[in-house]
Image (tube, rainbow, N blue to C red):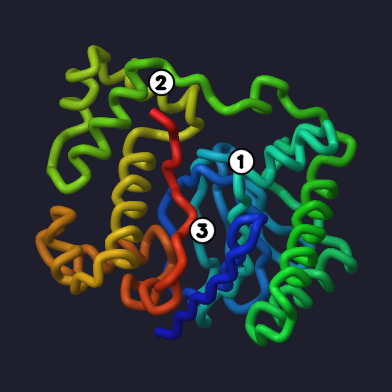
Amino acid sequence: MAESYAFYEGTFGQAIVLETCTDLVAHAHSESQIVFWLGGARAQANVGTEVVRYDENVGLATNAYQSHDMTRLDGTGPAVFLVFMISRKWLNELRRATGRPFVFPSSRIPIDAGLRQACWQVLDLILSAREPEDGLNGLVEQLISATIDATTRGRVADPRRLLPPLLDHRLRSAITLMREHVSDKIALDEIAHQVGLSRAHFFTLFRDQLNTSPQVFWSAVRVEEAMRRLIGQGASLTTVALDLGFSAPSNFSRFFKEHTGVSPSTFRRAAVGAMPATVTGLAV
């Protein structure tokens, strides 16, 4: 199956060109995310109770920690996306500079002709690398700002979502345990027990404070750790797989591809020398 993965890192965060024949399971990021469908297989995303069907006029926006997936709607070939992982630091600076709450009240991005043209222009520059870095950063920042404007125009965001989450101390302890045991086969019920929570309360805290589930978050922790090892250690894929508790490299490759859309080897080739956007970047 064809797959490709291209990175561009700037002050705004990361721009990613993703071509994939693989559906993505429910997953989450610590960054807000914008996704434009560029062509290929039709696809849709489930974000909570909202279903977003990608097309030329509709893209996807997710807030930090918001669980979402991607399903291709036909098997004719790969789907191609332009993805922006928006730096929390950059977004906070934009909030302070404008006094506006940049929180997506809806996951659906209305795409007009100008926004569509900007997407293709940014894509061309990322792939050709003809534009000086400062110029490309500026174009991407303008595109992100225009997308936020299109999504929030005429809407009022919930003010409770404008600040970073203030996590319950037991939730912080649970996240610490997940990171410490990222390579172990430990049950979620055991983590809940160790931090003094019932299973029901454990799941409720994740839902209410992080807008996701413990399973999705822990999978994100494992993906993040896999990314770090693939980039920073020079270890073989087999070593990374076994160190992270997978019984076979094939199981690791399948897990990684279900969450990112590309194989570990493709990710490593594209990302060597760059730190990937974190998916669970919580200060605990």
Label 2 vs label 1: CA separation?
19 Å
Label 1 sits on a secondary structure element that is loop
Q: Nearer the viewer, residue 166 or 42?
A: 166
Q: Nearer the viewer, residue 109 or 272?
A: 272
Between label 1 and label 3, give the one nearer the viewer.
1
Tag 2: amino acid: Thr
Tag shown at residue 63: 1
Q: Is residue 276 above or below residue 263?
A: above
Tag shown at residue 204: 2
**Number of numbered discs present?**
3
Percent across and percent down for residue 37 are 66, 68
The earlier-in-sequence mark between 2 and 1 is 1
Tag 3: amino acid: Met
Label 1 vs label 3: CA separation?
16 Å
Tag shown at residue 77: none
Q: Is residue 205 above or below residue 264?
A: above
Label 2 sits on a secondary structure element that is helix
Tell me: 89 left or right of 131.
left
Identify residue for label 3. Answer: 70
Tell me: 21 left or right of 12.
left
Tag 1: amino acid: Asn
The reply to whether the C-beta atoms of the residues labelled 2 and 3 are less than 8 Å apart is: no
